[in-house]
Amino acid sequence: ETGVTQTPRHLVMGMTNKKSLKCEQHLGHNAMYWYKQSAKKPLELMFVYNFKEQTENNSVPSRFSPECPNSSHLFLHLHTLQPEDSALYLCASSFAPTGEETQYFGPGTRLLVL
Amino acid sequence: DQQVKQNSPSLSVQEGRISILNCDYTNSMFDYFLWYKKYPAEGPTFLISISSIKDKNEDGRFTVFLNKSAKHLSLHIVPSQPGDSAVYFCAASRNSGNTPLVFGKGTRLSVIA
């Protein structure tokens, strides 16, 4: 059982749909992250939550809306996405970001926007 | 502008030989570096890290070397095994609290039996 789980693992949605990605961590961490991985690009940090408070929003379009109800759960709500948003969305968690924390990743959600 | 660069998109190595994966960075404020390994359809898994106060960190078959003056780090895997075939990501951060990891694009390692 991995410490960070993500559901669903695969998602196909139309541009007018609304869907949510879920992440759960069982490692007792305080910080959670959303990353986007597109083909041939580095991992892009989207959002950081530290003790449920959003501390980083890396210029992400408003069609991506994160929610962190507690330190163990993180959601990414999606609406009116574009085909170029198709990518692998990775969740990660760590202890409070001090600069030397190790982030542990979930398996990712492979998203295809049609 | 990419702050963390992995200039080799792919690398092939014979089983039993040494694999050397390279990473360069441009931000002199980075002081903590990590390597992650990623298999297809899985998230990246942490492999090894090094703080800027060290120039070498070893864990079993994996050794990371840091050359601060050259802003360069490398991951050595010896001996390489077929199960090491994966994409390896280099990441860096600043020890100033609340700063995100910055990742390279990754290098795909293929270990040939």
Image: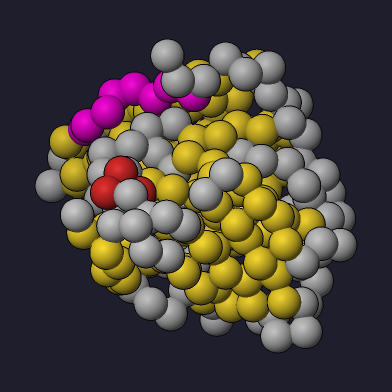
Q: Residue at x 59, y 77 (%)?
A: B24
Q: Is residue B72 left or right of residue A108?
A: right
Q: Quadrant of residue A109?
A: top left
Q: Would you say residue A7 sits in the magenta stretch?
A: yes
Give the dominant element type of the magenta stretch: helix, strand or loop. Answer: strand
Q: Quadrant of residue B96?
A: bottom right
Q: Is residue A77 visible to us here? A: no
Q: Is residue B46 visible to us here? A: yes
Q: Residue at x 33, y 37 (%)?
A: B42
Residue B89 or residue A47, whichever sits in front:
B89
The spot of residue B41 in percent (x, y) is 26, 39
Which quadrant: the C terminus of chain B? Answer: bottom left
Q: Residue at x 21, y 32 (%)?
A: A11
Q: Would you say residue A28 sits in the magenta stretch?
A: no
Q: Is residue B92 left or right of residue B22?
A: right
Query: Vertical placement of A5 versus B54: above or below?
Result: above
Residue B94 or residue B78, whichever sits in front:
B78
Q: Which residues are magenta?
A: A4-11
The spot of residue A2 in percent (x, y) is 45, 20
